[in-house]
Amino acid sequence: MVSQPPNDGPSDERPDAFSTDDAGIAFAAGAEGSLERIYRDASALVYTLAVRALGDTHEAEDVTQQTFVSAWRARDTFDPSRGEVRGWVVGIARRRIADALDKRRRENRKVDAVRSVVEDSASLDAELDQVLLSYELETLGDPRRTIMALAFVDGQTHEQISEQLEMPLGTVKSHIRRSLITLRNRWEVSDVAS
Amino acid sequence: MSHLDDEAVASLSVGDDQDATAAMHAAECVECANRVEHMRTLADRIGALGRSSGMLTPPDRVWEQIANELGDELLAGSDAESPATPLVIDLPIAGGDDSTDQATASADATEEFITDLSARRDAQAESRGEPGAEGAHVSHRRYTPWLIGIAAGVVGVVVGGGIVAGILDNSDPTGSIIAEAALTDLATEANAGTARVETLDDGREVLVVDTDTDFEDVSDGYLEVWLIDPNIEGMVSLGHLTQANEEFVIPNGYSVAAFPIVDISVEPLDGVPTHSGDSVTRGVLES
């Protein structure tokens, strides 16, 4: 983590933000190859959400498959002007995961089904939000990802991070500010999409 | 004072309150205090995530199964409702076959401009920001989410109706106005005037902006007029707006078909030549 080149100036966040948008437009129009492009971009996110929520990789594979098959068949209902395709796909995944949990619950024929539905959907959302935030942190790339972990997970001061990474203090602070702003913007987009 | 900018909110949220004016503002302004609190919550959540990213990659067979299940449905053109790739070329475009070539040409032109502009941005970043320099981040300002939204909207319209071809296929009998946009105030969604592209006798194209923008509101910056492409990759500044009715010469070589978004932004007095992301008015040029 600390072996990265020091003094790496702030890089532009999310260079892919607009190409994702492109992908959504191509997808909505049913362009050949557009589903594969979106799969490459979002499958890890969908699969991780499913594994975390269902605790079973086989079921998670099924949910991932169903999510992308449904997405392709419902592409006419995706409106690129209302948000990014990734958020839309995550919305589908959320429903597929909820369906899988419902099915499991019906099979178990729990007496207190009603109560657990409420509990599960709240904890499911919290779980999904956590995975989404992890994903967004990953996409910040280094050095920002490392700096954010040092600052917020390890609780290091800006001065300590500056020394450890041999990076000017102002640059560290700037990376932290820009990363927070980016994550907040992404977070808001996800909230809208879900 | 006006509300805190994102940078100030982020600074305060991590306990960096060296900017006493900003800290005082946050102490008095509920809205800004909430924004700081919101960002602090985000920071807490990042801390709660721990170190491992925990992202998992599905096995390759998942994509194979998707491709199997969809089969022919995945092929472009197998579904009458969905236009095939490439996007612009195969669309029904008003004006007949010859406009197809024009649309293609315009797509090529857009790509060229994107390349040019990003090269320019990179060069600018290099010249402004030595590694580690504080100034580096400002030249990299990105655009706020509405820009992404409007970009998608614009392309959606292009996809649906062939505006690109329409603008190029200028059949306006007067010969002077080649495209027009209704401007919208982004804060209120209210009508904010019009912008139109006219061809002058000498062949130059001008953008005539006729806006209701309230100049009184822009006390700590100035208004800048931009033409932006549908991907929000390329943009060109036409100059700054100082009165309700003003005319801007469009640089030779920039077609409004490739840059159909008219955008008026508030630019802070920071000497940064890129778009601030703070747009107040917009419109999309249509023929």
Image (cartoon, coloured by chain):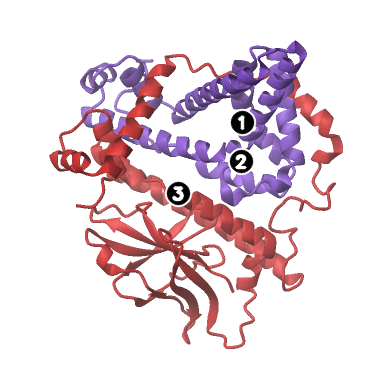
Chain colours: A purple, B red
Please tell me if label 1 and label 3 are on a single chain.
no
Give the distance between the C-alpha atoms of the residues marked 2 and 1, in whole angstroms.
Answer: 9 Å
Kindly report which numbered mark, 1 or 3, lies closer to the viewer in this rendering.
1
| Image position, residue B172 (x, y; %) | 61, 83
Please tell me if label 3 and label 2 are on a single chain.
no
- Residue sitting at x 33%, y 20%: A152
Please, what is the three-letter code of the amino acid marked with disc 1? Ala
The answer to whether residue B249 is visible is yes
| Left or right: B244 as drawn, with respect to A66 | left
- Residue sitting at x 49%, y 76%: B197
Please, what is the three-letter code of the amino acid marked with disc 3? Ser
Please, what is the three-letter code of the amino acid marked with disc 2? Val
| Left or right: B190 as drawn, with respect to B177 | left
Helix, strand or loop at label 3? It is: helix
Q: Chain of mark 3?
A: B
Q: Chain of mark 2?
A: A
- Residue sitting at x 22%, y 32%: A170
Q: Chain of mark 1?
A: A
For disc 2, the marked residue is: A85
Q: Badge 2: few (under 14), some or many (20 or more) residues near its Cα, within 10 Å? A: many
Closer to the chain start, of discs 2 and 1, is 1
Marking on residue B39: none
Marking on residue A42: 1
The answer to whether residue A9 is visible is no
Q: Badge 3: few (under 14), some or many (20 or more) residues near its Cα, within 10 Å? A: some
